[in-house]
Image (spheres, rainbow, N blue to C red):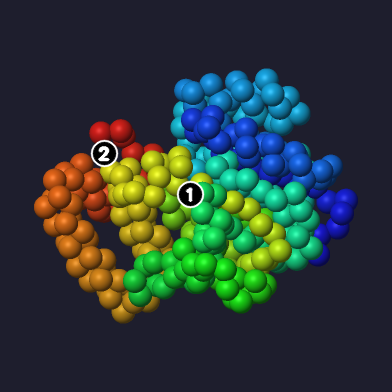
Amino acid sequence: MARSDQRVGIVLVNYNGMRFMPDCLASLQQMGEPQAKIVVVDNASTDGSAAWVAEHYPSVALIQLPTNGGVTGGNNAGIEWCLANGCDYILLLNNDTVVEPDFLQHLLLHTDARTMTVPRVYFYDNRQLLNSHIGHFDFWRGVNVQYLYGKPESASSRQMQQVTMASTCAMLIPKAIIDEVGIMDDAYFLYYDDTDFIARAVKHGAVIKYIPEAVIYHRESSSSGGWAISPLSMYYNTRNRLYFMFKHQQQKLILIFFLVYFFLGRIVTLARHIVRGETRIATALCKGIADFFKGNMGRAPAQRF
């Protein structure tokens, strides 16, 4: 359990999030946590959201990156700020969330030097359905297996449980784990970055606990165009899924099975988008595969989409 005198740094990564920042920051202010310090990392937004934060929340630290560093670059800048400012715990939080006033208190009760905690997450616009991405990673298929996502409330969702995979949409991480496993891998830029970080942490003996008493609400995938598949999401999900598997899976049999499963699935997906006339999405899929094998990682040029 974290001590009450230990400092928490709350990292919000912002990219043109003016429509979300007011609600998110207002909910964080209602927590009344004097030891919590908020840092907003702005990824070269053009909608005036960085200036709005500076004007309306002068006590919030604001880091303005000269270019869009993606989720990885933004989180890394925020994590480094927290470490430099003596934070014992770091809360990675999407800026398109709204939190309950006591959610951080509940997370802190169950967090220690070897334990990361995540809250119960609901869809913001449909609070009867869960948006929690807890579960485990299936290395045979290269996918996260979700236990609660998209499901209504149940006995399982009301119980604290230990899992091996979650999302950094909202995750409280002790400094000790970051000191041991490092920060986010900038090769991802967007998608699979949290899967990679968690996989590294778990390999080093870290534990993830789902704390149902801690509650937040999430407008999912707002920064990348919503839940619908876009050329951007197709490109990064395709490329980064391959990168993650080759980075973390050394058993040849599992990797071969995954590659067969992956490419059969991509062929079907490619054909479906071509038939629908969604040529930009189909092209992004092909470029994602090609760029992985060429070693083109990090932020991709805009023409990839």
Q: Which residue is mark 1?
A: 220
Label 1 and label 2: CA atoms lie apart by: 23 Å
Q: Is residue 215 visible?
A: yes
Q: Badges 1 and 2: C-beta atoms under 8 Å apart?
A: no
Could you say whether the residue bearing mark 1 is in a helix, strand or loop?
A: loop
Specify the quadrant of the image occupied by residue 32: top right
In the orientation shown, which residue stands out farthest toward the bottom?
253
Q: Amino acid at mark 1?
A: Glu
- Counting residues from the N terminus, which is met first, the one under dot 1 or under dot 2? 1
The answer to whether residue 141 is left or right of residue 145 is: left
Q: Which mark is residue 230?
A: none
Q: Say which residue appears at 62% left-offset and 29% top-offset.
A: 63
The amino acid type found where label 2 is placed reads Arg
Work out whether 42 lies above or below 105: above
Circle 2 SS class: helix
Rendered image quadrant of residue 14: top right
Percent position of residue 231, x then y? 28, 43
Q: Is residue 29 left or right of residue 80?
A: right
Q: Is residue 105 above or below residue 74?
A: below
| Residue under numbered circle 2 | 304
Quadrant where the image shows the C terminus: top left
- Looking at the rendering, in which quadrant would you find the N terminus? bottom right
Q: Residue at x 28, y 75 (%)?
A: 257
The residue at the point 69 percent across, 36 percent down is 26
Between residues 296 and 118, which one lies in front from this camera angle?
118
Q: Give the image location of residue 262, x and y in percent.
A: 26, 66
Percent x, y of residue 164: 55, 71
User: Badge 2: how crowded within 10 Å, few (<14), some, or many (20+)?
Assistant: some
Residue 70, placed above or below residue 108:
above
Local packing at callout 1 (Cα closer than 10 Å; few below 14, some 14-19, many 20+) is some
Q: How many marks?
A: 2
Farthest right residue?
A: 5
